[in-house]
Amino acid sequence: MKSVISVDIPQNPYDVVIAQDAIDHVGAWLSNHEQPLVKPGQKLLVVSNPVIFRHYGDRLVQSLESVGYQVSTCILPAGERYKTLRSIQKIHDAAYDAKLERKSAMVALGGGVIGDMTGFAAATWLRGIGVIQVPTSLLAMVDASIGGKTGVNHPQGKNLIGAFHQPKLVVIDPQVLKTLPPREFRAGMAEVIKYGVIWDAELFAALEQTDRLDQYRYVEGELLQMILTRSCQAKAEVVAQDEKESGLRAILNYGHTIGHAVESATGYRVVNHGEAVAIGMVAAGKLATALNLWSRDDDQRQYQLIEKTKLPTAIPSQAGAEALIALLQGDKKVEDGRVRFILPKAIADVFITDQVSNQDIRPVLAAMTTP
Amino acid sequence: MKSVISVDIPQNPYDVVIAQDAIDHVGAWLSNHEQPLVKPGQKLLVVSNPVIFRHYGDRLVQSLESVGYQVSTCILPAGERYKTLRSIQKIHDAAYDAKLERKSAMVALGGGVIGDMTGFAAATWLRGIGVIQVPTSLLAMVDASIGGKTGVNHPQGKNLIGAFHQPKLVVIDPQVLKTLPPREFRAGMAEVIKYGVIWDAELFAALEQTDRLDQYRYVEGELLQMILTRSCQAKAEVVAQDEKESGLRAILNYGHTIGHAVESATGYRVVNHGEAVAIGMVAAGKLATALNLWSRDDDQRQYQLIEKTKLPTAIPSQAGAEALIALLQGDKKVEDGRVRFILPKAIADVFITDQVSNQDIRPVLAAMTTP
């Protein structure tokens, strides 16, 4: 099984390749083009973290060296708290030591943190060199690796520092999800459900027909290949139409507005990103239902998918409704002081609005808060 | 007198406005478009250094506030040694404190260091917000402010960290050059001479017909307006054809290959950037003459312009020929291990070559070295 999805961003088109054992073919796919994406003989800097590199580093490096690339590595500690400018400096130091040139490239082997940082380091080295994304978490596969959003956290807020920098290639090997911790697998599935709600009714229906969505072993094989392909296809279609998030792309933030506030209000220690998105989707669904924008039935269908994935559906007790509302005002998605919400109208149909008032939000948050 | 030059970069076109007292009109020009470049009422962060801000800060802020912008300021210490990621963090902190949003912008008021840093901070805040360049040195006016090269230095090398980020508007007020130290004025004139050699024979001829080029007072008024306009026009035409330096844009590095090596070999303390470019142009001219690529007469004409501007024409004794050759190999412009040179064939006609050997370079450098 092999799927190839084109991300048709004007001037920066690229492919997402999804295939079993893809890790062993990265070198071949980089070099085997009429115009190789990176010229064989060039230098590549592989950036990863210790756990991921122990699992998959040798196979990736072997695949790259076997077609003639000069490979160096930069191993950074794992975890969101290392997603800082300090880590970018470490990647830059490694780039300097490896003598990367303008036609060299970096290869991100890891989850969203590694992907975001490597992309940003590549965007800012020699005013932009190539980057290849090899995501190893479900979240990174279906979201972060595609679309060119890169960056690090500012001491005062997540992802405030960053740039748009499209990869030259995204390579997804579904089998690496076997070693992903189950909680992280479920977190990634939250984004998959999101694509069903905002874009792809067939994906939504396929998820509904599956008994369990909470572990790799229940979906591996053809179903997982389909889930990854349709999710990446959805992301690719949206970002190709709106690379820099001036309009449509904002729908990818479905569930993220309240989700970010929940993450922030609980100090990023209680729920992870995917869990926060699940809570945010539940909140957006309830808000849309309360405003008579979508049906109670569709809201229930979304809710059941989230529950079936064993994702949280309630706001943790550490986050109060008023604190969440205050945080919403400080969100990056604020424009002219108004909070933008993505709300569903039907399965695979959402819209963007800044007409939601705090009075609308308050009862929804209150009803969802764990007593 | 007012000149408006269009920089026709696909998807990011913008104007360079050159006019007396332009500083007092920045607010009006930003807001007075059918589609304002920055919406009145939005937040602007002015970044400058203490000396420049004392001279021109009040006038600029007044111009911006008078049309309704909310203005904050970030004042950084002057000097190349502050062109670091640490300063970018300070601008980011100020951006956070000022609550900049995606449609806010930064305004760079200063020379090349302020312009490069503000551009890079804007490129990397919220994945890219707008920047307006108000250059106050001749070098920044004719070179750094146009074309979107932004960045900071890495501990191991200049401008290794950076991004392409085009400004929304460049505003040039020739009268601010009155307060520019004479040595910096001459340094900027080196880049003006460069445009004559690589692109604009009429500019070259006009410079030849002027008695003195080494001080503001000899050129102020119409001649200076013409010099700025033609230089900016040349830069605009080149970068519009090749935004990311994949080809033509490299000709802007005329004089810079050996120039950078001279700056580096003398620890950036003996010659400034413009002086190094002057030395580099003399070297490129001698190299082209030795290789029978251009005439001794044209070489002499270029030499006389540089001398008339009281710019250095010899390599400082601190830099040895072998050290320079070693540094050339480490230059950012190296591709596949070969040094690229820009060499002149005639006035306003240069070409790019990687066919120059160390054997060709050595005697030229030896002949130019101060004993």
Image (cartoon, coloured by chain):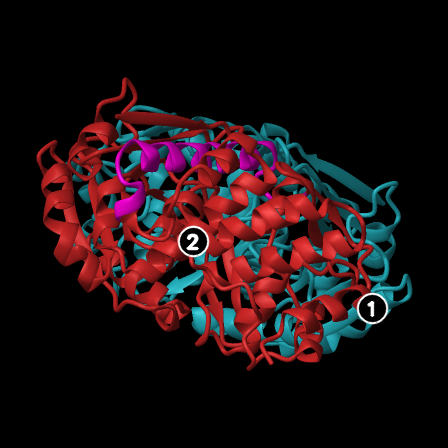
Chain colours: A cyan, B red
Element at badge 2? loop
Query: Mark 2 belongs to which subunit?
Result: B
Image location of residue B76, percent across then percent down: 25, 65
Image location of residue A189, percent across then percent down: 57, 51
Q: Nearer the viewer, residue B299 or A14?
A: B299
Residue A34 highlighted magenta (yes or no): no
Query: Mark 1 belongs to which subunit?
Result: B
What residue do we see at 40% from left, 63% from top? A153
Q: Which of the numbered marks, if any, corresponds to residue A233? A: none
Q: Nearer the viewer, residue B158 or A180?
A: B158
How far apart, in angstroms, are the residues tagged by discs 1 and 2?
31 Å
**Mark in front: 1 vs 2:** 2
Q: Is residue A62 left or right of residue B11?
A: right
What residue do we see at 59% from left, 51% from top? B253
Q: Which of the numbered marks, if any, corresponds to residue B309? A: 2
Image location of residue B256, percent across then percent down: 58, 57
What residue do we see at 47% from left, 74% from top? B268
Residue linked to disc 1: B359
Element at badge 1? helix
Q: Is residue B137 left or right of residue A182?
A: left
Question: Which residues are the magenta region?
Answer: B217-246
